[in-house]
């Protein structure tokens, strides 16, 4: 079996992964693995922008307070302040990569405002901010990959991690630590090992665990599942954010209508054009996402309508084409003119607020394993993410993680440990792919029906029972047949589904994104939900 050695093994090519790799390349050899192309990630689809206090009338304290309010006070105050205060450094890192953020005619930053924010503090590059940031970072990563020497980046696309390599599982004594991972090359089918004293998971969230999501197909919770199977602590997985405004059209696959559209004056209305948000929250259409998503869900159930609508017609075609050119063109391709028509929308699974328990500098409960970005739970988001805080967290935590690992890297003692070859046992090539697709579909449907925007004890119990059975079936399938990308993703998706349900069952209150009819009020005790990693 081939073994690839490196100082830092980064898994994931979203903003957290790319920025981690760029910073760490200053200290040693980086292997950057992603299961599709570099640009196939959630970050690339981000429309709105990145939070950063820059207006003299704004303050870090205001931003922190907005974040804590949106997170229903479950966020960790020290973490919130630290990440908000480091945001300017993250913006500068992107500018250094060549990202050109929007400016006004007088040369000042054109800062946007989104739901839950008390001021304009969103850096953006039109309505395709993520795409432009990813493109700039990928150019820089590829430039470093061409350099020779020890301080470089080895890019491995179409490489999916099977499992982390843990010292105790391969028979080594002493502290249990991560030593790298087994990797499947999706194109050749080869399985090899990446041996590294520092593995950094930046794999994003698990939006695909739900039937309706605006996430790309890559969002199967791989990093969270990998870390849990390795024994890492998992925190706050019950808090799955549903983006309130996903375009509702039979041909529109996972297309978001950015939060920034409401920030620029759009209001939520029913099919008759009547605004309804004020009866749910005094902030109206600018309320935080959890409130807006539940309100839309409530209106749809009350009226029996398939969707609600956004109304921004008053802004006119000239303004909309200039401020939201991509969204305007996309809607128009489906026969919807934002300047003349109401925009049909529905909520869809969007962001994983929980994940691998980690510090702001990426440290997890397992030595040698770091987590950055959406797959990590630092305590920034609490029970609900404030709009555009995600990319800010990815940038800041990537920088802080590199600052921790770079100058004082964790290294193996003595000779690099021997890594056993991947064992296939008596596994044979799969001949019933329909089983995988069927189980995949069943998980996503039961999660949408039983563990969605509104929950109950009975629904959660049903979900828990069925997922337990499905996980056993998946485990049997996994060991019977040779591994494939679809099998690996299904396996990870099922783990994340179970973690979400178990976390939801442990929270006996309604807070932020977790709303249950059995416990409709806030508990007086504010505490996170922590699940210990797998011990098998």
Image: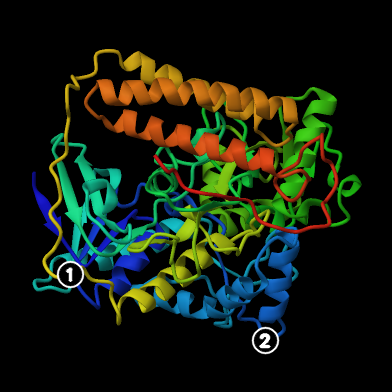
Give x and y (percent) for residue 436.
37, 20
Residue 74 or residue 327, whichever sits in front = 74
Please name the colour scheme applied to the rendered image: rainbow
Q: Is residue 154 left or right of residue 115?
A: left
In the displayed structure, 138 sits above or below 352; it is below
Q: What's the residue at 78%, 51% (across, down)?
A: 285
Give x and y (percent) for residue 168.
28, 51
Q: What's the residue at 60%, 38% (across, down)?
A: 502
Q: Which residue is mark 1?
A: 152
Residue 318 or residue 76, whichever sits in front = 76
Q: Which residue is mark 2?
A: 56
Disc 1, SS: loop
Q: What's the residue at 30%, 77% (across, down)?
A: 406
Residue 261 circle label? none
Q: Is residue 505 left or right of residue 373?
A: right
Q: Is residue 243 left or right of residue 119?
A: left
Of the image marks 1 and 2, the number of the one nearer the N terminus? 2
In the displayed structure, 352 sits above or below 342; it is below
Q: What is the spatial separation of the Cα atoms under label 1 and label 2, in whole angstroms?
A: 39 Å
Residue 337 visible, this angle: no
Give x and y (percent) for residue 310.
72, 43
Residue 154 visible, this angle: yes
Q: Residue furthest right?
A: 279
Residue 265 or residue 185, whichever sits in front = 185
């Amino acid at each position: 079996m081939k073994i690839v050695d490196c100082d830092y093994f980064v898994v994931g090519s979203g903003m957290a992964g790319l920025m981690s790799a760029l910073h760490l390349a200053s200290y040693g050899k980086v292997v950057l693995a992603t299961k599709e192309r570099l640009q196939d990630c959630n970050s690339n689809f981000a429309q709105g922008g990145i939070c950063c206090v820059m207006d003299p009338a704004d303050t870090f304290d205001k931003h922190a307070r907005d974040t804590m309010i949106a997170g229903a006070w479950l966020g960790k105050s020290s973490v919130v302040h630290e990440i908000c205060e480091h945001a300017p450094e993250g913006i500068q890192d992107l500018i250094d990569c060549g990202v050109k953020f929007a400016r006004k005619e007088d040369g000042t930053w054109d800062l946007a405002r989104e739901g839950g924010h008390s001021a304009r503090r969103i850096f953006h590059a039109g309505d395709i901010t993520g795409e432009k940031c990813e493109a700039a970072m990928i150019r820089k990563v590829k430039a470093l990959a061409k350099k020779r020497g020890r301080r470089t980046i080895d890019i491995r696309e179409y490489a999916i991690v099977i499992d982390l390599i843990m010292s105790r599982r391969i028979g080594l004594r002493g502290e249990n630590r991560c030593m790298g991972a087994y990797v499947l090359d999706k194109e050749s089918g080869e399985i090899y090992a990446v041996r590294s004293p520092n593995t950094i998971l930046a794999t994003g969230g698990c939006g695909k665990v739900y039937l309706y999501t605006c996430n790309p197909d890559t969002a199967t919770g791989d990093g969270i599942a990998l870390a849990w199977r390795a024994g890492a602590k998992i925190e706050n997985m019950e808090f799955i954010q549903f983006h309130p405004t996903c375009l509702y059209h039979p041909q529109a696959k996972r297309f978001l209508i950015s939060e920034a559209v409401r920030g620029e004056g759009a209001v939520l209305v029913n099919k008759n054009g009547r605004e309804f948000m004020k009866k749910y929250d005094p902030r109206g259409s600018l309320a935080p996402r959890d409130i807006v998503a539940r309100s839309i869900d409530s209106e749809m159930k009350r009226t029996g309508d398939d969707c609600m609508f956004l109304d921004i017609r008053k802004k006119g075609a000239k303004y909309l084409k200039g401020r939201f050119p991509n969204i305007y063109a996309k809607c128009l391709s489906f026969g919807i003119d934002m300047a003349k028509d109401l925009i049909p929308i529905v909520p869809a699974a969007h962001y994983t607020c929980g994940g691998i328990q980690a510090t702001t500098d990426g440290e997890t409960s397992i030595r040698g394993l770091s987590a950055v970005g959406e797959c990590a739970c630092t305590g920034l988001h609490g029970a609900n993410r404030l709009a555009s805080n995600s990319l800010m967290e990815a940038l800041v935590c990537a920088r802080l993680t590199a600052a921790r690992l770079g100058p004082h890297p964790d290294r193996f003692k003595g000779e690099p440990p021997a890594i056993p070859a991947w064992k296939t046992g008596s596994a044979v090539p799969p001949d019933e792919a329909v089983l995988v697709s069927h189980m995949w579909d069943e998980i996503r449907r039961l999660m949408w029906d039983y563990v969605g925007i509104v929950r109950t004890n009975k629904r959660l119990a049903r979900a828990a029972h069925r997922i337990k059975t499905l996980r056993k079936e998946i485990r049997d399938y996994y060991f019977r047949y040779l591994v494939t990308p679809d099998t690996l993703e299904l396996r990870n998706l099922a783990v994340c589904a179970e973690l979400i349900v178990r976390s939801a069952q442990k929270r006996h209150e309604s807070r932020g994104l977790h709303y249950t009819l059995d416990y409709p009020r806030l508990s007086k005790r504010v505490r996170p939900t922590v699940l210990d990693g797998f011990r098998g």
